[in-house]
Amino acid sequence: MISGSMNNSLVIGIKENTQNNLFSIYPNPATSKAVINFNNQGNTSVTITLVNALGQEIKNIVQNDLGIGENSVKINLENVPAGVYFITVKTGAAESVKKLVIE
């Protein structure tokens, strides 16, 4: 005999971080390219990662030559299948995640 309680929970997604508006994406939905706008607070490298809904990394872009202040990075999406993706932008100690739809 087995006693106790069991909690059956299922993870069905990645929560988008809307508290920290570190960056913006346009257009969203996107087709062949997306532009990431962000504010670089210091002389740190910026890492932009695109993952699919399964958490598999599709693209990883590291920018080391960006100035302090507003910056933008274009991401080529021509060979990326349509679907829902998540973009993570890391600048120094700050990190933010947003959803990107590719049509």
Image: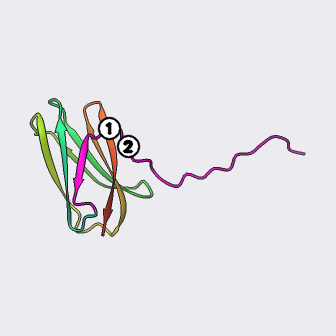
The x, y position of residue 54, in whole percent, is 45, 57
Magenta stretch: dominant secondary structure: loop
Q: Which residue is mark 1?
A: 20
Question: At 52% across and 55% down in the image, what residue appears?
Answer: 12
Do labels 2 and 1 touch, CB within 8 Å?
yes
Left or right? Give the position of 79 relative to 3.
Answer: left
- Separation of disc 2 and disc 1 at Cα? 6 Å
Q: Secondary structure at mark 1?
A: loop
The question of residue 9 being in magenta is answered with: yes
* Direction from residue 65 to residue 83 in the image, left or right: right
Pinpoint residue 45: horizontal percent, then vertical percent: 19, 36
- The residue under the point 68% across, 50% down is 8
Q: Which segment did they paint magenta?
A: 1-28
Q: Where, quadrant-wise, is the C terminus in this rendering?
A: bottom left
Q: Amino acid at mark 1?
A: Asn
| Residue type marked 2 | Asn
* Disc sitting over residue 94 in the figure: none
Q: Which residue is mark 2?
A: 17
Classify mark 1: residues with Cα within 10 Å, few (<14), some (14-19) or many (20+). Answer: few
Residue 93 quadrant: top left
Vertical position of residue 4 compared to residue 29: above or below: above
Does the segment drawn in magenta span residue 25? yes
